[in-house]
């Protein structure tokens, strides 16, 4: 079910993405991206960060409130849980690149006013519009393995038909048909850490999350043997 799909969308960031595959150049260009409407209400673009040739590429959903204000991915509660899970899985031993499928925070005001901003999942049109950035980052980093954290990350790679429940805990190939520009890479699909935070049985959800991440760590260990 994880074959890549050509989901067209009117809005796209394609014209804002430079031909360069320098992460510094890409990050600078992303600051002025207006590929979809989310830039209007976000504080700033939150681009990825990590080593140029990181072995592990962590692809999440979108920046949250903390990330939107800080300008860095995975620095809020979800990022803290992810760090703990990666340590238990053994992934923290590898070089990591962290980014999101969507680069701007999607939110709505809290009822009754006030300063609190309520997270809204990105719509598929936002994911599709922002896909050229994720693709450019993958081309620049060329990781050994991608960890797709949640539905938005999976849809960014594999299209609107992606379902976390069907895909998690297994290794998938991306792009499915191969490409001259993008080297084929193995993708481990799992839930987003925010789903663990929301789970009724958080301990059980965390254990399952670590198990999925351990699959990526074991795959990397096999490559080193």
Image (cartoon, grey):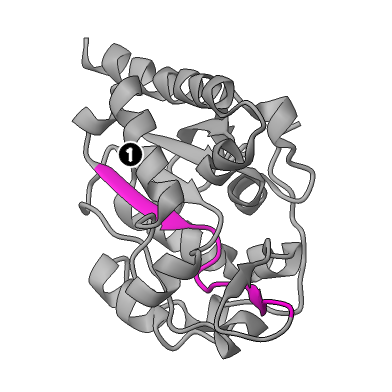
Question: Horizontally, is 172 left or right of 85 in the view?
Answer: right
The reply to whether residue 144 is in sight is no
Residue on which disc 1 sits: 83
Residue at 43% from the left image edge and 82% from the top image edge = 44
Image quadrant occupied by the N terminus:
top right
Question: Residue 43, how many percent across, how many down?
Answer: 46, 84
User: Residue 138's x, y, as percent?
Assistant: 41, 52
Q: Position of residue 4 (x, y in %)?
A: 68, 44
Question: The magenta stretch spans which residues?
Answer: 96-111
**Would residue 53 appear left or right of 46 to someone viewing this image?**
left
In the foreground, 98 or 145 = 98
Residue 119 percent across, percent down from the top left: 62, 66
Q: Is residue 199 above or below residue 50?
A: above
Crowd rating for badge 1 (residues with CA inside 10 Å; few <14, some 14–19, many 20+): some
Please identify the quarter of the rendering in which residue 81 is found: top left
**Visible residue check, residue 4:** yes
Q: Is residue 144 left or right of residue 108?
A: left
Image quadrant of residue 95? top left
At a point 39% along the width and 54% down the height, the residue shown is 74
């Amino acid at each position: 079910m994880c074959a890549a799909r050509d989901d067209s969308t009117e809005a796209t960031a394609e014209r804002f993405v430079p031909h360069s595959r320098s992460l510094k150049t890409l990050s600078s260009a992303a600051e002025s991206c207006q590929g979809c409407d989310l830039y209007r209400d976000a504080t700033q673009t939150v681009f990825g960060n990590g080593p140029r040739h990181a072995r592990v590429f962590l692809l999440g959903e979108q920046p949250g409130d903390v990330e939107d204000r800080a300008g860095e991915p995975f620095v809020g509660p979800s990022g803290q849980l992810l760090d703990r899970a990666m340590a238990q899985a053994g992934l923290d031993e590898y070089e990591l690149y962290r980014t999101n499928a969507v680069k701007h925070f999607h939110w709505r005001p809290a009822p009754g006013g006030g300063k609190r901003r309520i997270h809204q999942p990105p719509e598929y049109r936002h994911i599709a519009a922002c896909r050229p950035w994720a693709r450019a980052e993958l081309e620049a980093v060329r990781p050994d393995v991608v960890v797709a954290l949640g539905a938005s990350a999976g849809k960014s790679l594999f299209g609107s038909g992606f379902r976390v429940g069907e895909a998690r805990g297994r290794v998938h190939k991306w792009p499915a048909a191969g490409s001259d520009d993008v080297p084929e890479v193995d993708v481990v699909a799992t839930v987003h850490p925010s789903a663990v935070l929301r789970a009724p049985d958080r301990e059980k959800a965390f254990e399952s999350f670590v198990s999925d991440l351990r699959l990526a760590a074991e795959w990397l260990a096999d490559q080193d043997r």
